[in-house]
């Protein structure tokens, strides 16, 4: 008999929130309750969220995607998120999917452990890797193509990834998706419902995803028509030393992986707005018939 998923939230001192999970984190309605628990802790001002998986007996690819998404939401909000207490079989799934290289893990969530680790001494400084290129300084992202591919698969895409010293190119296809990817025209009044909750905006003249190292382009079929379920994404590994994410957040590799996970999730679930220009064409709009989104 499968064990139902249990979620219990506790607030500790020093702005720490512990979310204890028990049972199975897998495909199903109960697992979707993890995200609201994390978002709720962020809204309540948690400086650190610890997901305690001590009582979790099983996790599948859906659960891994939820963990990655929660890490992305916390990272974008400036909240530390850590995973603790994983059993061997659960930790093995994190290792296979390589998420263990993105989300920090620890053996225990006890306050003494975190105090020893130095998490109670204010905001931790995030170190960016800076490359000196002649007179210019660049932020250098040492990205792992396999981790990028894993993030795409977790979001529901079939990905072809090409790695180069200066960037990564991904051809993404949402195989079997019934409707188009949620890439919509921000200027269309009929899309205000999506725009109001949108996190990502694309400059339609250049394809640049604003305030990120990501750019997007349409993919065309053999007849020259835009494919509704596919896009091409370019990721720059070299950025100006002055580059910052929204909120002036520094960019590091873990922060970027979280950013990418959220962007891919937006293409599938919440929407990405195209602002002006004609280089990038919207794939969906108010006539799109995948449920009541507007």
Image: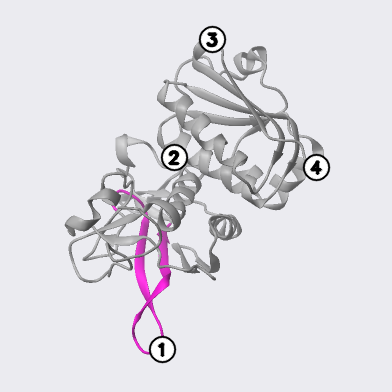
Q: Earlier in the sequence, mark 4 or mark 1?
A: 4
Q: CA distance from mark 4 to mark 1?
A: 45 Å
Numbered badge on residue 222 = 1
Q: Name the spot of residue 266 as percent of width and height, x first.
A: 41, 52
- What element does badge 2 sit on? loop
- As for residue 222 lying within the magenta part, the answer is yes
Q: CA distance from mark 2 to mark 4?
A: 34 Å
Q: Give the answer, above or below, for where 229 lies relative to 214.
A: below
Q: Earlier in the sequence, mark 3 or mark 1?
A: 3
- For label 2, the residue is 128
Q: Name the spot of residue 71 as percent of width and height, x first.
A: 52, 38
In the image, the segment drawn in magenta is 210-236
Residue at figure coordinates x 54%, y 20% from the top left = 17
Q: Quadrant of residue 110?
A: top right
Q: Is residue 272 left or right of residue 97?
A: left
- What element does badge 3 sit on? helix
State whether residue 125 appears in this view.
no
- What element does badge 4 sit on? helix
State whether residue 235 appears in this view.
yes
- For label 4, the residue is 89
Q: CA distance from mark 3 to mark 4?
A: 31 Å
Image quadrant in which the N terminus is located? top right
Label 1 Cα neighbours within 10 Å, binned few <14 / some 14-19 / many ≥20: few
Q: Earlier in the sequence, mark 2 or mark 3?
A: 3
């Amino acid at each position: 008999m499968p064990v139902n998923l249990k979620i219990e939230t506790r607030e500790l001192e020093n702005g720490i929130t512990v979310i204890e999970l028990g049972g199975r984190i897998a495909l199903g309605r109960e697992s979707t309750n993890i995200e609201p628990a994390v978002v709720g802790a962020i809204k309540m001002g948690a400086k650190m969220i610890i997901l305690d998986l001590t009582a979790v007996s099983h996790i599948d690819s859906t659960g891994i995607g939820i963990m990655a998404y929660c890490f992305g939401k916390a990272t974008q909000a400036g909240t530390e998120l850590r995973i603790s207490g994983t059993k061997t079989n659960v930790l093995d799934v994190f290792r296979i999917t390589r998420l263990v290289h993105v989300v920090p893990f620890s053996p225990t969530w006890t306050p003494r452990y975190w105090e020893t680790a130095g998490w109670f001494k204010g905001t931790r400084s995030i170190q960016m890797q800076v490359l000196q290129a002649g007179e210019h300084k660049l932020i250098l992202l040492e990205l792992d193509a396999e981790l990028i591919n894993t993030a795409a698969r977790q979001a529901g895409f079939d990905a072809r990834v090409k790695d180069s010293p200066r960037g990564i190119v991904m051809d993404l296809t949402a195989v079997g998706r019934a409707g188009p990817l949620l890439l919509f025209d921000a200027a269309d009044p009929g899309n205000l419902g999506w725009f109001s909750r949108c996190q990502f905006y694309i400059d339609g003249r250049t394809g640049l995803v604003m305030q990120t190292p990501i750019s997007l382009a349409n993919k065309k079929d053999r007849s020259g028509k835009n494919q509704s379920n596919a896009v091409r994404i370019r990721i720059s590994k070299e950025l100006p030393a002055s580059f910052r994410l929204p909120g002036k957040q520094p960019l590091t590799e873990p922060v970027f992986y979280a950013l990418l996970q959220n962007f891919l999730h937006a293409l599938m679930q919440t929407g990405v707005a195209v602002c002006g220009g004609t280089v990038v064409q919207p794939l969906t709009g108010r006539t799109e018939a995948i449920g009541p989104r507007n």
